[in-house]
């Protein structure tokens, strides 16, 4: 029989070994997060209110819409909150609280949207991107709206990591087949569908998906898709993301950048 002192020592070393493995796993998890530090800072500001995961109000009164991400909508106009909307808002609130609501801003090339909101990348005073913080947790989706495309390749990597780990939104059935899309569906959606027909007008290229939905690419945006050629997507399956709207009894979605139009591999 082994001496009791030896057994106690072995047990202690065993616990230390497993504790070391636990620390290593935490370190690996942290290393897996993507960080997109600022290349410059245009302004420093104080947040006075958080509307949701991607929109805040500054002490100056300006609203800021974060570039590169979209988070689920909070309850509004008698519509219930979308899945994980509260979680996204709480995650942003928690991060801001840790830094006394101070943020640094890097403005987009287009500084304001049609609603008058400032368009900016936002960071903590230590340089952590608010956008990638939410993407890493799977609480935001990447969205690309030219000309504000700075750092989107980094943001795409953050989403890819969360998606591969099925975190947050990526653990939910948040990609809808175009043939199963409700005719009343509106707002931001991620849709998968087969391109059954290509149409072209003077101003737009149309990718018609199975089920009757159409993707619209303004010809002024076609240069962003190089070297891809959306005209060659007929018969291919794509995943598109953007805001659904109705026109002439048809559901449509404007797609402005390749990060919002993923071409699936041939089946």
Image (spheres, rainbow, N blue to C red):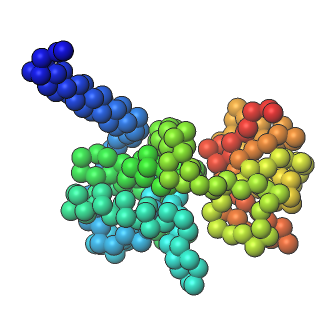
| Depth order, front residue of 250/63 | 250
Q: Is residue 10 above or below residue 143?
A: above
Judged from this view, the residue extending furthest toward the bottom is 78
| Rendered location of residue 174, percent (x, y) | 63, 56
Q: What's the residue at 50%, 43% (across, down)?
A: 162
Residue shown at the point (29%, 45%) measured from the top left: 127
The answer to whether residue 42 is seen in the rendering is no
Image quarter of the C terminus: top right
Is 107 on the left-hand or right-hand side of 187?
left
The residue lying toward the viewer, choosing from 158 and 83, is 83
Task: Estimate the x, y position of residue 128 in percent, counting from the top left.
Answer: 31, 46
Nearer to us in this view, 175 or 252: 175
Residue shown at 23% from the left, 25% from the top? 14
Depicted 183 relative to depicted 137: above or below: below
Q: Position of residue 152 (x, y in %)?
A: 51, 43
Residue sitting farthest toward the top: 1
Residue 15 placement, left or right of 119: left
Task: Report if residue 151 is visible in the image.
Answer: yes
Q: Name which quarter of the figure residue 166 lies in.
A: top right
Label tally:
0
Q: Residue furthest front?
A: 1
Instruction: Name which residue lies at 79% across and 70% down.
Output: 183
Question: Does residue 213 sit above or below 11 in this rendering?
Answer: below
């Amino acid at each position: 029989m082994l001496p009791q002192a030896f057994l106690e020592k072995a047990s202690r070393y065993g616990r230390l070994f497993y504790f070391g493995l636990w620390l290593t796993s935490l370190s690996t998890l942290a290393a897996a997060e993507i960080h997109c530090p600022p290349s410059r800072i245009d302004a420093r500001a104080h947040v006075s209110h958080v509307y949701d995961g991607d929109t805040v109000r500054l002490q100056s009164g300006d609203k800021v819409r974060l570039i590169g991400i979209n988070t689920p909508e909070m309850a509004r106009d008698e519509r219930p909150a979308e899945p994980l909307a509260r979680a996204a808002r709480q995650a942003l609130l928690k991060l801001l609280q840790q830094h006394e609501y101070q943020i640094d801003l890097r403005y987009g090339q287009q500084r304001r949207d049609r609603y008058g909101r400032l368009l900016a990348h936002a960071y903590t005073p230590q340089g952590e991107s608010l956008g990638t913080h939410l993407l890493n947790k799977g609480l935001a989706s990447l969205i690309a709206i030219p000309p504000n495309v700075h750092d989107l390749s980094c943001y795409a990597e953050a989403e890819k990591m969360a998606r591969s780990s099925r975190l947050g939104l990526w653990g939910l059935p948040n990609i809808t087949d175009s043939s199963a899309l409700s005719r009343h569906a509106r707002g931001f959606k991620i849709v998968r569908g087969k391109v059954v027909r290509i149409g072209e007008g003077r101003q737009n290229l149309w990718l018609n998906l199975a089920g009757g939905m159409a993707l619209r690419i303004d010809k002024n945006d076609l240069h962003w898709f190089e070297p891809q050629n959306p005209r060659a997507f007929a018969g291919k399956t794509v995943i598109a993301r953007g805001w659904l709207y109705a026109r002439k009894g048809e559901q449509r979605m404007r797609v402005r950048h390749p990060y919002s139009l993923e071409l699936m591999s041939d089946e």
